[in-house]
Amino acid sequence: MSLRLNNGQMFPHLQLPAIGGGTLHLPDDLVGKYGVILIYRGHWCPFCNEQIAAFVEAFPALSERGIMVAAFSADNEEVTREFVEKQRIPFPVGYSADVDEVVQATGAYESTFPTRGCFLESSGFVLAPDSTVVNAVYSSRAIGRLVPGDVIRLVAFMEGLKAQAR
């Protein structure tokens, strides 16, 4: 069993193919800004669809506050591309994540359903500009996930603490 990431730990390096071409380099693609990494179960999960839709809707507010977002799953390229188009996702999305590698690196849970095979359970991470974990949310099933309003409030709180310290 792998260990979960704790606040203050560096987020591990992951590379995934990205929709639109190229490679998603996490956390490197988010360095210098607050970042959110969303691991979602797959395009077929209604709870994941709701979470991603919430981040799409909040994307202008997140961007205005300098918060970057990236997401990925174990889904293949074709269904991920369709998911990105359907949801109109404006942030980078990776696909074909190696479930074992992600579980070992991040501590995310994995599940297997006869009709879906092996997949990652939802996990969400808020990272500081230096790629350290500020908050980690792990779900062992369909519910319990990071929401954009909490991310915005957390980053505002942390920025307030930095301002007070000056």
Image (cartoon, rainbow, N blue to C red):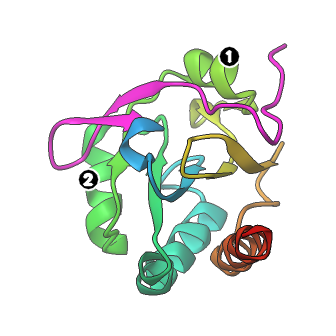
Q: Mark 2: which amino acid? A: Arg
- The reply to whether the magenta stretch includes residue 134 is no
- Using the rendered view, name the quadrant where residue 150 is placed: bottom right
**Disc with the residue nearer the chain's start (2 vs 1):** 2
Residue linked to disc 1: 104
Rendered location of residue 70, percent (x, y): 44, 53
Q: Residues within 10 Å of mark 1 (few under 14, many from 20)?
A: some
How many numbered callouts? 2
Q: Mark 1: which amino acid? A: Gln
In the shown orientation, is residue 100 left or right of residue 71?
Answer: right
Query: Looking at the picture, does residue 139 appear above or below residue 2?
Result: below
- Residue displayed at 59% across by 73% down: 50
Quadrant position of the C terminus in the picture:
bottom right
In the shown orientation, is residue 105 left or right of residue 134?
Answer: left
- Using the rendered view, name the quadrant where residue 59 is placed: bottom left
Distance from Cα at disc 2 to Cα at disc 1:
26 Å
Numbered badge on residue 29: none
Task: Between residue 158 and residue 78, name the one nearer to us.
Answer: 158
- The reply to whether the magenta stretch includes residue 7 is yes
Rendered location of residue 4, percent (x, y): 82, 30
Query: Looking at the picture, does residue 95 appear above or below residue 38?
Result: above
Numbered badge on residue 81: 2
Magenta-colored segment: predominant secondary structure: loop
Rendered location of residue 82, percent (x, y): 27, 58
Mark 1 falls on what kind of element? helix
Query: Looking at the picture, does residue 4 appear above or below residue 57?
Result: above
Task: Between residue 54 and residue 85, name the one nearer to us.
Answer: 54
Determine contact: label 2, label 1, CB under 8 Å. Answer: no
In the image, which residues are magenta? 1-26
- Residue displayed at 36% across by 50% down: 93
Mark 2 vs mark 1, foreground winner is 1
